[in-house]
Image: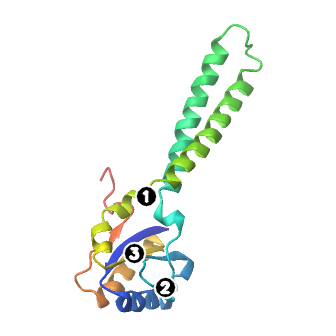
Amino acid sequence: MKRIYFLAPDINVTRKIANELLLARIEEKHLHVIAKRGTPLEDLPEANLLQKSDFIPAVEQGVALGGATGLLAGLVAVALPPASTVIAGGILLATTLTGAGVGSWIGGMVGMNVGNRRIKEFEDAIEAGEMLLLADVPPERVDELEKLVKQHIPEVEVEQTEPRIPAFP
């Protein structure tokens, strides 16, 4: 899935676009709306903590950093004289898994308290009364759904989580 972001000027346009996306077979659980605090969303699906925070990226970073730290600690433990080569694999596995577990736990706790970095660029528009709609869509349907959104808001800039151009063309 690829997450696309776009701003809608008001609740009526947001509702029309959400309905169009639903008709295009994008499930409601993949649509999330973020609006200014206190704005009634009525029947629109409000973004939850997972969309509003950096929880998922923080857990991913925690697993990577914790696992690398655990692996390094395991290599140091194997290099010390009391460890034999027979149990070296077990030590490396245990320290890597422990490090990854602790890293994901700490990363998740930090990520829950940090706002989504991707949404920060839209904060001014949200505070001005616009609504941010996030949609998780299959990568092969991004262009089709962009055209659908542009039928309602021709000047919209659809942002995506991943760049369209590969890092190494």
Distance in Å between CA atoms under marks 2 and 1: 21 Å
- Badge 1 density bin: few <14, some 14–19, many ≥20, Cα 10 Å: some
Count of picture labels: 3
Name the residue nearer the viewer: 14 or 88: 14
Amino acid type at image mark 2: Leu
Query: Residue 151 is drawn in which quadrant?
Result: bottom left
Left or right, 42 with reference to 98: left
Distance in Å between CA atoms under marks 3 and 2: 21 Å
Q: Of the residues under marks 2 and 1, which one precedes in the sequence? A: 2
Identify the residue at image location x=42%, y=90%.
15
Question: Disc 2 marks which residue?
Answer: 44
Distance in Å between CA atoms under marks 3 and 1: 25 Å
Identify the residue at image location x=71%, y=25%.
91
Residue 142 circle label: 3
Residue 57 picture location, percent across and down: 49, 52
Query: Residue 72 is drawn in which quadrant?
Result: top right
Please say whether residue 132 is visible from this viewpoint. yes
Left or right, 149 with reference to 139: left
Residues under numbered marks 3 and 2 in contact, where contact means CB atoms less than 8 Å apart: no
Say if 16 sits above or below 77 in the image.
Answer: below
- Number of the front mark, 3 or 2: 2
Where disc 2 sits, the SS reads loop
Residue 53 picture location, percent across and down: 48, 59
Residue 115 circle label: 1
Q: Residue furthest front?
A: 38
Q: Residue furthest left?
A: 155
Amino acid type at image mark 1: Gly
Say if 140 sits above or below 149 in the image.
Answer: above
Residue 131 picture location, percent across and down: 36, 79
